[in-house]
Image (tube, rainbow, N blue to C red):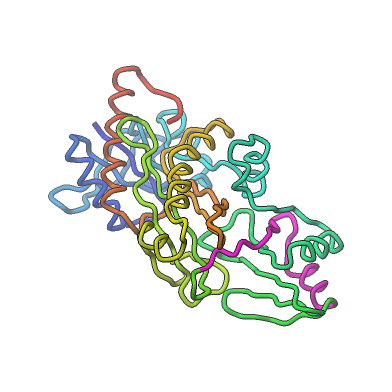
Amino acid sequence: MIVGYMRNIKKPQKFVRLVAKATKYNGIDLVYFTANDVDMERGVINGLMLIENKWVRKEAPVPEFIDINVYCFKHKKVMNFLRARSTLSSGRFAPKDIVNKRVLEDGVFAHLVIPSESITDFKTFHNFLKKHETIIIKPKLGHRGEGIYMLSKNKSDYILTYENQDTKLNKRKLKQFFKNDINHEQYIFQKHINSRTKNGEPFDCRIRLEKNGLNKWQAAAYLIRIGTGQKIVSNVAQGGSVSELTPYLKANYENWEAVRDSLRDIGNKFPYKMEQIFNKKITSMGIDIGIDQDGKPYLFEVNTAPGHEFAMGDIALIKSEHYKYRLTKTKSKGKIQGC
């Protein structure tokens, strides 16, 4: 049996080698490929397979199941070709503002949604800022914490923070910023949640999930990501550190057990709710949760193309078991739709 692993990077990363080894243990060969490796005329993949611990170029039929992330969807012709011949693992739910809206409408996890608005005029923008005093302005389709601003009211002036730089603005300059620097259709405006360590550094909890060998969601890790030396984001891609969940909560919250249980409840139930709300089945998910000073959780983001910088081994093992499940089901029932 063969499983596909499609990404946009030509050379397989260290993590893919772990996945290929774990997959081979289950009697399945993994073929790694990019859009350029798909021969649509002949209906084959000219990908890479791990043979005696070396990546070797091999020709393979289109696998019945392909692990793919959302960044490959830009190759529309190739994706349509593969979708007609295989089952694909991934998909994107919606931009952040639509996710928030749908979760609010559903109601079950409405308490996690941060007050936010899509704003097109300065008056509404200014009133939103006055109401919440500090707000976050971020791209609806953001990536790794890029392009995020924090804006605070400071007496008669305003403090705009971008990356690690503070800029003092008067109202006239604030209007200029709103008019010239923000594409209102591509940004979302949110109340700032004070999810910070005792040292004032931003942090969040990343719940990293994969579908397992029973086709159920399984948490590979609950990690606290701390933006060491940062002012807005806690994404370690921009520098920072990580901590295990329980030790961090014990050191920072008197009600740490209740906070831990609420996070585990989110990890156990929220992935299924997202699939239900958007009627999409996927296999990987990262849920980013902020926690305020009282221990209340807030939804920062749902990522359907989460990284694997941490808990690599656990993620690789869970993926390999899910591949076995998918291919066994496909073999016994013919091609299946969705995940």
The residue that appears at 20% across and 48% down in the rendered structure is 50
The residue segment tinted magenta is 172-196
Location of residue 178 with respect to 310 vertically, above or below: below
Location of residue 63 with respect to 5 vertically, above or below: above
> On the rendered structure, is 17 left or right of 77?
left
User: Which of 236/263 is in front?
Assistant: 263
> On the rendered structure, is 127 left or right of 262?
right
Can you name the residue that lies furthest to the front here? 254
**In the rendered image, which quarter contains the N terminus?**
top left
Task: Specify the quadrant of the image occupied by residue 277.
Answer: top right
> On the rendered structure, is 326 left or right of 205?
left
**Percent position of residue 287, x then y:** 48, 49
User: Which of 326/203 is in front?
Assistant: 203
**Percent position of residue 326, x then y:** 33, 29
**In the rendered image, which quarter contains the C terminus?**
top left
Residue 187 on the magenta span: yes
Location of residue 227 with respect to 66 vertically, above or below: below
**Percent position of residue 221, x then y:** 36, 51
The residue that appears at 41% across and 55% down in the rendered structure is 307
Residue 174 on the magenta span: yes
Task: Specify the quadrant of the image occupied by residue 308.
Answer: bottom left
Can you name the residue that lies furthest to the top here? 333
**Percent position of residue 233, x then y:** 54, 67
User: Which of 161/261 is in front?
Assistant: 261
Q: How many marks?
A: 0
The residue that appears at 68% across and 59% down in the rendered structure is 191
The residue that appears at 27% across and 40% down in the rendered structure is 320
